[in-house]
Amino acid sequence: MTSKTQVPPRWRNDVERILITDDQLARRIKTLSRAIERDFRGREMVVVSLLNGTIMFLADMIRHLSLPLRLDFMGVSSYGAGTESGELVFTKELRIDVRGRDVLLVDDILDTGRTLSRVIPKLRALKPRRIKVCVLLDKPSRRVERVKADYIGFTIPDFFVVGYGLDFAERYRNLPFVGVLHSHIYKQDIGRVMSFRKRR
Ligand code: IMP
Ligand code: MG
């Protein structure tokens, strides 16, 4: 998947190129939502969305779902500011009771699978009727855990991407497109962490 659209000048130092444009995102999310709507056949669902990366994807997707739904969030955070997922910490628990319910679990990106392989059993313990997994992006080449998504927006190669909710060290979530982060950004960040350590 390549896009000829240019990175806006403001982001050129940070983003190497646009991988998925806002138009491509909008079109794909519309078709994805239709498929979800068909599969749930009007049954009420509980959408469980993982914070913080899903904000834009979720907002755009659920407005296409014309079926009764309830929405809740689980806060999941992996320690460390790097591009590797570290130790997983739950920062917000679910409040809606999902017992006997149809759950749509939403995440931004399925990478190594470590996050979902911890979240799914935690959710399953709450005894929902079924859990369907929906991710905007899938990087299958990076998988270390056996996790599969039922709905996938885009399958992408092993690039570190930012924008449309996805971050690097909590930045870039506001970009309206999905772009490939310049490697000098994370190398520079590792440099900062190292010099910080040395000072202590
Ligand atoms: P996993 O646990 O390795 O599957 O990764 C899941 C989480 O890692 C995602 O929810 C993201 O927060 C983060 N992540 C993985 N790959 C990327 C990426 O390319 N850009 C931004 N965040 C990523
Ligand atoms: Mg993240």
Image (cartoon, rainbow, N blue to C red):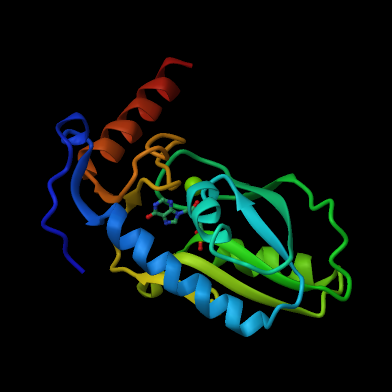
Identity of the residue drawn at 75% across and 77% down: 43
Would you say residue 196 is visible in this rendering? yes
> Which quarter of the image is occupied by the N terminus?
bottom left
User: Residue drawn 17% across and 43% down?
Assistant: 7
Most distant residue in the front direction? 66
Give the percent coordinates (x, y) of residue 48: 69, 60
Residue 94 in the figure: left or right of residue 147? right
Q: Quadrant of residue 38?
A: bottom right
Residue ranking furthest to the top: 199
State the residue at coordinates (14%, 32%).
9
Residue 185 vs 63, above or below: the answer is: above
- Seen in the image, is 81 located left or right of residue 87? left
Is the residue 105 above or below the residue 102 in the image? Answer: above
**The one of 90 and 27 positioned closer to us in this rendering:** 27
Q: Find residue 73 and report its horizontal and vertical position in percent.
A: 70, 51
x and y, in percent, of residue 115 in the image: 59, 61
Front residue (pair 87, 75) = 75
Q: Quadrant of residue 58?
A: bottom right
Compared across the picture, whether 126 is left or right of 76 comes to right
Image position of 87 with respect to 125: above or below: above
Q: Quadrant of residue 4?
A: bottom left
Q: Position of residue 51 (x, y in %)?
A: 61, 47
Q: Is residue 182 left or right of residue 22?
A: left
181, 190: nearer the viewer:
181
Q: Residue at x 30, y 64 (%)?
A: 158
Q: Nearer the viewer, residue 147 or 80?
A: 147
Q: Is residue 112 visible?
A: no
Q: Count of labels shown?
A: 0
